[in-house]
Amino acid sequence: MLKKIDCIIIGAKKAGTTSLKNYLMQHPDIISHNTMEFNFFLWDYEFEKTYEKMFNHYFNVSNNENSKKTILAKSATLYCNEKAIKRIHNHNPDCKLIFVLRNPTDRVYSDFCFNKKNGRAGNENINELIVDIKSKNYKTQMFTRYVCIGLYVKYLITIYKYFPRENVLLIKFEDLVSNSAKVLDMVFHFLELETVDNINYNKIHNKTTVPKYPIIAKFHNNLRNRSNIIRRFLPFRLYKCISAFLSDFNRSKKKFNDLDRKHRKILLNYYRPYNKELEKMTGIDFSHWEI
């Protein structure tokens, strides 16, 4: 019988989840997928193909091997989707969830730059988003894409409908960055695994930098579209190799400019009441997010 998912990193997007997954994969008793995301619970067209088929698609392990290991998955926007959370519960009500929380203001701008890097943002301008917030126009595409997914308290309420709090591990992004080893020890304890000391934390995964060539970023983004005729005829593993090559080739060492201080203040003010509610719900101090 195919083993169920034991633990899933559910978010947040641009909060170090890719690095966390890759660090955890170095534990000898953890098995995960080599792709960046496991979207079975999130995407309807994958969910309809059955768990067995999609598990074999993502995980390259035998039944004998995976039955003895902790099966870890990652889907960085899953926390925003109640239907996906419910699917996880139906799949395995004992599943453990890991939720990395990043200052939502920083997360917004990092996500925006990430989409610019990958050719997904098109002609979007961060000024438009600030205008939406100042005018309380909360139904725009940009607001939904970037701002809404930082309302962590709203999504935690939904998560706790399906899973007990002891099954949900909350990690501060700042802690993951400043003391990765301590965070990993906490995760191993959460997963009831022995601590290991030989984890390599040197590489930062999925780092956002300005693309060398915007036209390649645009082509790469079009290739990701499932309706793209080139992708449709490429074997999945070959597509992933090409995608990884394009991403690495087009990555420069140049960073995006920092978020304008006035824009930052507007975002901080918007998120402040939600962050206060998050503190009350979790008992975690997020006052450092006010800076």
Image (cartoon, grey):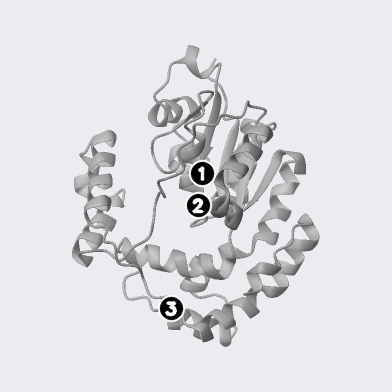
Q: Quadrant of the C terminus?
A: bottom right
Residue visible at 76% across and 40% down in the picture: 166
- Label placed on residue 126: 3
Work out whether 28 lies above or below 255: above
Work out whether 163 lies above or below 228: above
The percent coordinates of residue 120 (x first, y second) are 34, 64
**Tag 1, which secondary structure?**
helix
Mark 3 and mark 2: Cα distance apart in space:
22 Å
Tag count: 3
Work out whether 61 lies above or below 242: above
The percent coordinates of residue 242 (x first, y second) are 22, 44
The amino acid beneath tag 1 is Leu
Between 214 and 234, the one nearer to me in the picture: 214
Q: Which residue is mark 1?
A: 20
Q: Pointer 2 and pointer 1: residues touching (CB < 8 Å)?
A: yes
- Label placed on residue 16: 2
Question: In the image, is 5 to the left or to the right of 213?
Answer: right
Q: What is the crowding at mark 3: few (fewer than 14 residues within 10 Å), some, or many (at least 20)?
A: some
Q: What is the crowding at mark 2: few (fewer than 14 residues within 10 Å), some, or many (at least 20)?
A: many
Q: Pointer 3 and pointer 2: residues touching (CB < 8 Å)?
A: no
Between 239 and 167, the one nearer to me in the picture: 167
The percent coordinates of residue 61 (x first, y second) are 42, 20
Mark 3 and mark 1: Cα distance apart in space:
28 Å
Query: Who comes first in sequence, dot 3 or dot 1?
Result: 1
The amino acid beneath tag 3 is Ile
Query: Who comes first in sequence, dot 3 or dot 2?
Result: 2
Between 261 and 109, the one nearer to me in the picture: 261
